[in-house]
Image (cartoon, rainbow, N blue to C red):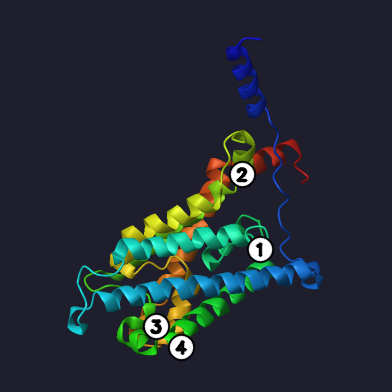
């Protein structure tokens, strides 16, 4: 057989490879509460979010202290905004890679919310994941304050706040669009249809997810400090506990949840034609 024929046959085999979407997660699955794998996943989400906040907030505070001219720093010193973005994106890449096989590697209530809307996780799992993520974030920032208390209070505690000169609408829009980019990437990178169609091109899901976080931080750090993760914003606000952080806190919950909902709808009902499938199923069997 000629080389061209072999390549054509191989491409045909890849394109014809079947795939199976996992069944929708039940809304309420009480059996999860009796399984060790469920609690193991909660522990993984807690520890991953703790480590995520510890490394990233410490990076933010370190940069501010190194670039503080009044304290003898260099305005060009430290890792810069680019380094901060790398810290956030790199940690997400590492932690999603480590926890994907245990908990799915959410590490973000907005991601969990989007997957819940798409029926990828049950309501019980979604709520418990969010609780574990928020507790992990609080503990992670608490460790930063314990180790760097003087610098922590002086340089804002890594708390997300709307920057001066930007309106509330701009900040909210930045969080919505930024979270949309992240959650859309999560759906695309973990899509079983894509994995089957492109099975000859290995897709390491944590890599594009980490890059999405990196790119969004580059764009929105000057606007909101970049939340796109309600647990990250809540953890910093709880430990820092200043009025400005609390006054702007709603932006870092409403924005990410709206962005995640739009991403879930776009991927499931536009790209995957979920609405058309449901309508076709109804027409073929009106009693369903």
* Residue that mark 3 sits on: 246
Circle nearer the viewer, 3 or 1: 1
Structural distance between the alpha carbons of marks 3 and 1: 30 Å
State if disc 2 and disc 3 touch (CB < 8 Å).
no
Residue 261: x, y in percent? Answer: 52, 58
Towards the viewer: 104 or 4: 4
The residue shown at (43%, 80%) is: 236
Quarter of the view holding residue 179: bottom left
Q: Which mark is residue 146?
A: 4
The residue shown at (58%, 57%) is: 97
Circle nearer the viewer, 2 or 4: 4
The residue shown at (72%, 72%) is: 39
Badge 2 or badge 1: first in the primary sequence: 1
Quarter of the view holding residue 197: top right
Towards the viewer: 76 or 244: 76
State if disc 4 and disc 2 touch (CB < 8 Å).
no
């Amino acid at each position: 057989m000629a080389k061209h024929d072999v390549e054509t046959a191989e491409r045909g085999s890849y394109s014809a490879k079947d795939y199976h979407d996992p069944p929708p997660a039940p809304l309420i699955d009480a059996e999860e509460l009796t399984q060790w794998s469920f609690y193991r996943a909660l522990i993984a989400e807690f520890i991953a979010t703790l480590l995520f906040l510890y490394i990233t907030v410490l990076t933010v505070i370190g940069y501010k202290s190194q670039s503080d001219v009044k304290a003898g720093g260099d305005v060009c010193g430290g890792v810069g905004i680019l380094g901060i973005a790398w810290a956030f994106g790199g940690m997400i890449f590492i932690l999603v890679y480590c926890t994907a096989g245990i908990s799915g590697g959410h590490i973000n209530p907005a991601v969990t919310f989007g997957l819940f809307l798409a029926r990828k996780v049950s309501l019980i799992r979604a709520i418990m994941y969010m609780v574990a993520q928020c507790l992990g974030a609080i503990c992670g920032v608490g460790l930063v304050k314990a180790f760097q208390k003087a610098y922590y209070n002086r340089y804002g505690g890594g708390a997300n706040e709307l920057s001066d000169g930007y309106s509330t609408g701009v900040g909210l829009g930045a969080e919505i669009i930024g979270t949309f980019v992240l959650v859309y990437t999560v759906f695309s990178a973990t899509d079983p249809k894509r994995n089957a169609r492109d099975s000859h091109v290995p897709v390491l899901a944590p890599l594009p997810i980490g890059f999405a976080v990196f790119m969004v931080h580059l764009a929105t750090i000057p606007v909101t400090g970049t939340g796109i993760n309600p647990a990250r914003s809540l953890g910093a606000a709880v430990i820092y506990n200043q009025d400005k952080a609390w006054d702007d806190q709603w932006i870092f919950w409403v924005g990410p949840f709206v962005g995640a909902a739009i991403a879930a709808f776009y991927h499931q009902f536009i790209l995957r034609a979920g609405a058309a499938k449901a309508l076709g199923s109804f027409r073929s069997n009106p009693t369903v």
